[in-house]
């Protein structure tokens, strides 16, 4: 995960080549080698998401360009350096551009190579910068769609719109993703195996991959992620199937996860590459397109595979509401209940949403915890918005999509269906009126109330998102104040990724309970009035640097304390040597 919001600018064509008119990427790459294009795309996508050695522009250009283009690279570096000397930080590498470059040319047939190596090297770089420009032009929608919003809401909304389409692919910690994906996968397969309704689906899933058990399936898949998370070099990574008796079986497994030359790639949010993040370069040799997508196959990709296989089952075995079972019975009743039960283990009063429902308590939260004078209310929402809408950069689209899922949705009959915000507000009202029959042992003016929205995908760990959802919450809170209710000890709503709780469960269950970390987060992001800055740029940097999601804050918080410890369950799935390698890479 990165060190904060990148407030620099992406290198565009007009900056890199001010005296040229850009061509299309097809024009630049016509007559070039398809294999080289794909190799370069995979190479550029192999850089670390943060602290990459290629953040150094000189090192990057020296790596990209050979001896024939030394002068070309030097002139380019001088132009970039001149811009940065004016106080503008430029970035060259962009995940979007790398993925687009791969998509554009993977399905194209080979053609005669008419460009010289020297020409092709320059033109390939220019094509990449054209894609950078395409991305920044798309970001302009973020500015226009938020132009009429009121301050101070406008800036967080604009930031969210600018970065949401690509934030999940550029701001992450590969070790954290790998660990939490693995833990969630173990919990999921245990659930599928223990549930009579889902067991036939699990059996068909394992038959698809020719594996006798989910443990063997997971072991095979985790083996494919080794090079994605343990590679010390920043470049493309290959998975090589070892020749021997199991060679054919090993190839057959991974070939269910590769894109083929005749595939029509779904471009919205790179769905096809997410689904099949490898391509074949030789017999038994498979190249990773993007490390993150490989690691996400461990858990995130399982639902889509299960959904596809479920449609092929006999009618009497097919699950009619697989999404409901997945998002409610597993995500909430298994995952959320288990993790919150771990991080608040002792000396507290706690109820699951199911327990509260069984008591007949209406509009209960998905989890309730009171530790002393601190009440934590959790709503869990496992959802995704359509990929084409996600990539819109448009506040109006996001406002509508997130509004109906997390605020409220107006139904055809005119009634409002409450989302997480309204559910939390309604139950806060119940607490303040002392109408919560399951817990009467508090005085409403003494307790601090922490409203928490648990999400299940790191795409929502994007700067500005918490501000948007909390603004809805604050509007509703003022209505409670107008009704005469005591709202002065109600904390801001916080978006908390379940992965953050899973990964940091040891520290959270020990001396750093979640509610205290939430306090530290809101103190960190609070705008302090009267603070002096040297100039406008410093003030802007300070403000934008604080618009960070809770997931990034807790990552940095425990890292600073030296408390980044893998959860205990990883001892059962990561051999000692593998674990040591992970710890070494984290440092």
Image: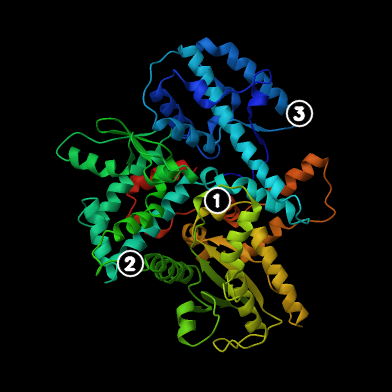
Residue at mark 2:
191
User: CA gap, disc 2 to disc 1?
Assistant: 30 Å
Label 3 Cα crowd, 10 Å radius (few <14 / some 14-19 / many 20+): few
Q: Secondary structure at mark 1?
A: helix
Label 1 Cα crowd, 10 Å radius (few <14 / some 14-19 / many 20+): many
Residue at mark 3:
86
Residue under the image location 48 percent in, 63 percent down: 382
Disc number placed over residue 144 in the picture, else none: none
Q: Is residue 277 left or right of residue 554?
A: left
Marks counted in the figure total: 3
Q: Secondary structure at mark 2?
A: helix
**Image quadrant where residue 581 sits:** top left
User: CA gap, disc 2 to disc 3?
Assistant: 56 Å
Tag in front: 2 or 1: 1
- Image x and y of residue 365, in percent: 54, 76
- Image x and y of residue 54, in percent: 54, 29
Residue under the image location 61 percent in, 23 percent down: 22
Residue under the image location 27 percent in, 58 percent down: 312
């Amino acid at each position: 995960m990165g060190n904060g919001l990148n407030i620099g600018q992406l290198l565009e064509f007009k900056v890199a080549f001010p005296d040229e008119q850009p061509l299309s990427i097809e024009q630049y790459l016509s007559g070039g080698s398809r294999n080289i294009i794909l190799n370069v795309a995979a190479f550029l996508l192999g850089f670390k998401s943060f602290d990459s050695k290629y953040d150094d522009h000189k090192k990057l250009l020296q790596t990209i360009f050979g001896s024939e283009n030394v002068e070309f690279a030097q002139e380019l570096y001088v132009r970039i350096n001149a811009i940065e000397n004016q106080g503008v930080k430029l970035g060259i590498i962009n995940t979007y551009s790398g993925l687009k470059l791969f998509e554009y040319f993977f399905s194209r047939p080979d053609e005669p190579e008419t460009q010289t190596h020297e020409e092709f090297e320059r033109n390939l770089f220019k094509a990449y910068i054209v894609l950078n420009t395409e991305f920044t032009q798309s970001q302009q929608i973020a500015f226009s769609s938020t132009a009429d919003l009121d301050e101070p809401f406008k800036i967080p909304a604009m930031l969210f719109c600018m970065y949401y389409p690509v934030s999940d692919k550029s701001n992450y910690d590969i070790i954290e993703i790998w660990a939490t994906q693995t833990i969630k996968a173990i919990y999921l397969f245990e659930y599928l195996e223990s549930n009579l309704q889902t067991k036939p689906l699990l059996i068909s899933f394992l038959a698809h991959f020719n594996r006798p058990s989910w443990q063997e399936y997971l072991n095979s898949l985790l083996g494919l992620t080794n090079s994605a998370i343990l590679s010390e070099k920043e470049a493309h990574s290959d998975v090589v199937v070892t020749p021997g008796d199991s060679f054919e079986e090993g190839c057959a497994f991974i070939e269910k996860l590769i894109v083929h030359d005749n595939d029509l790639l779904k471009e919205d949010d790179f769905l096809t590459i997410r689904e099949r993040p490898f391509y074949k370069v030789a017999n038994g040799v498979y190249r990773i397109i993007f490390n993150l997508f490989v690691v996400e196959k461990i858990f995130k990709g399982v639902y889509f595979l299960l959904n596809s296989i479920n449609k092929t089952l006999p009618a009497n075995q097919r699950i009619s509401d697989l999404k409901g079972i997945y998002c409610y019975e597993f995500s909430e009743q298994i995952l959320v209940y288990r993790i919150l039960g771990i991080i608040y283990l002792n000396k507290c009063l706690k109820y699951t949403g199911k327990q509260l429902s069984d008591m007949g308590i209406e509009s209960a939260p998905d989890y309730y915890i009171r530790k002393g004078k601190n009440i934590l209310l959790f709503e869990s929402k496992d959802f995704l918005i359509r990929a084409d809408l996600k990539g819109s950069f448009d506040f109006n689209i996001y406002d509508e999509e997130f509004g109906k899922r997390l605020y409220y949705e107006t139904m055809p009959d005119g009634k409002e269906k409450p989302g997480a915000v309204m559910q939390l507000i309604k139950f806060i009202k119940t607490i303040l009126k002392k109408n919560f029959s399951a817990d009467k042992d508090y005085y409403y003016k003494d307790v601090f109330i922490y409203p928490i929205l648990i999400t299940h995908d790191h795409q929502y760990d994007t700067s500005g998102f918490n501000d948007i959802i909390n603004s809805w919450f604050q509007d509703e809170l003022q209505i409670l104040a107008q009704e005469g209710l005591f709202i002065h000890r109600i904390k801001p709503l916080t978006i908390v990724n379940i992965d953050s709780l899973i990964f940091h469960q040891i520290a959270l269950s020990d001396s750093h309970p979640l509610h205290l970390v939430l306090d530290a987060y809101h103190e960190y992001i609070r705008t302090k009035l009267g603070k002096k800055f040297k100039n406008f740029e410093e003030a802007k940097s300070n403000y934008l640097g604080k618009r960070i999601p809770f997931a990034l804050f807790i990552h940095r918080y425990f890292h600073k304390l030296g408390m980044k410890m893998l959860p205990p369950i990883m001892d059962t799935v990561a051999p000692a040597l593998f674990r040591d390698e992970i710890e070494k890479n984290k440092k």
